[in-house]
Image: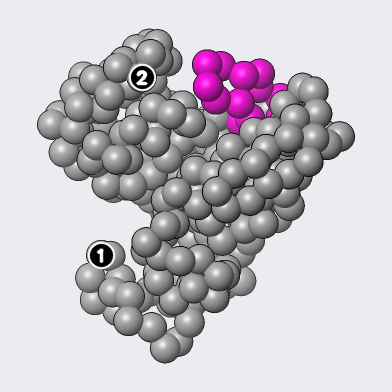
Amino acid sequence: MRLAVTIFLTDETITPNRLARELEQRGFAGLYLPEHTHIPVERTSPYPAGGDLPREYGRTLDPFVALGQAAAVTERLALGTGITLVAQHDPIDLAKQIATLDHLSDGRLTLGVGYGWNVEEAADHGVEWRTRRELTRDRMALMRALWADEPTAYEGEFGSVRASTAYPKPVQKARGPVSGPRTLIGGAAGPKLFAHISEYADGWMPIGGRGLSESLPLLRSVWTDAGRDPAALQVVPYAVQPTPGKLAHYAELGIEEAVLQLPPAGEAEVLGVLDAYAEYL
């Protein structure tokens, strides 16, 4: 099983270039970074994990800038977002950022897509909460039009783009209904999420990886009903606190990659945890 890591990189933690070099030298598969543009102080959205919102949420580095630095100092390390809040971006600008990073890293990018949990953060971006999933779907379709080999127009419910010259293109070619870099959608298990995964993604990024024995059969059923190749489905448990038993269970389920959680800490602490995680490689 490939083992990658995720971390809230901030202005107070280990730097992206230092971490990326250490990951590649140790044989880890990849680095995934989360995204929050800002955290409004006055908010009512509860922290999904309960309790007070950790300090690092309001200090995260921009994932695309940080991953660009990581790409520049590595050759094999996969790079990913976990996740990109697509609804909070201008899709034309985002399509350019994604394609550029994928091009410069020689196709090493995984685009993790999410819908978010912080209502106030999304509202400051003009996102109407109840339609954020549909908005994300629409913006993904618009980006696929810009990534197409030939100039392709798109007219959607929330946005449009004229047929355009737009380079660079993502390295990976279209597979079924999906184009662009490898695309994984995060979120809680359910028919609506699984329908969106089957429509415009390569797979699922379940946070924590709990309950997969029950949810995977439903996802596989929705996937195959959508006409997708059963062998092409990718499931990548995310932000995992690893144990030998947990990783063995993932392997039994046919999972080929897991993303382990690192603490949002300085170099010494992070590298110490990496050394402990290296025992699982």
Q: Could you tell me which residue is drawn at 40 percent across and 15 percent down?
A: 228
Visible in this render: residue 146? yes
Q: Amino acid at mark 1?
A: Ala
Residue that numbered label 2 is attached to: 226
Measured as percent of width and height from the top left, residue 72 is found at 76, 42
Residue at (30%, 79%) from the top-left corner?
Answer: 52
Quadrant placement of the N terminus: top left
Give the percent coordinates (x, y) of residue 17.
68, 51
Pointer 2 local density, CA inside 10 Å: few below 14, some 14–19, many at least 20: few
Residue that mark 1 sits on: 49
> Label 1 neighbourhood size at 10 Å, few (<14), some (14-19), many (20+)?
few
Residue bounds of the magenta highlight: 168-181
Residue at (59, 44) in percent of width and height: 156
Secondary structure of the magenta portion, mostly? loop
* Secondary structure type for disc 1: loop
| Residue 92 placement, left or right of 198 | right
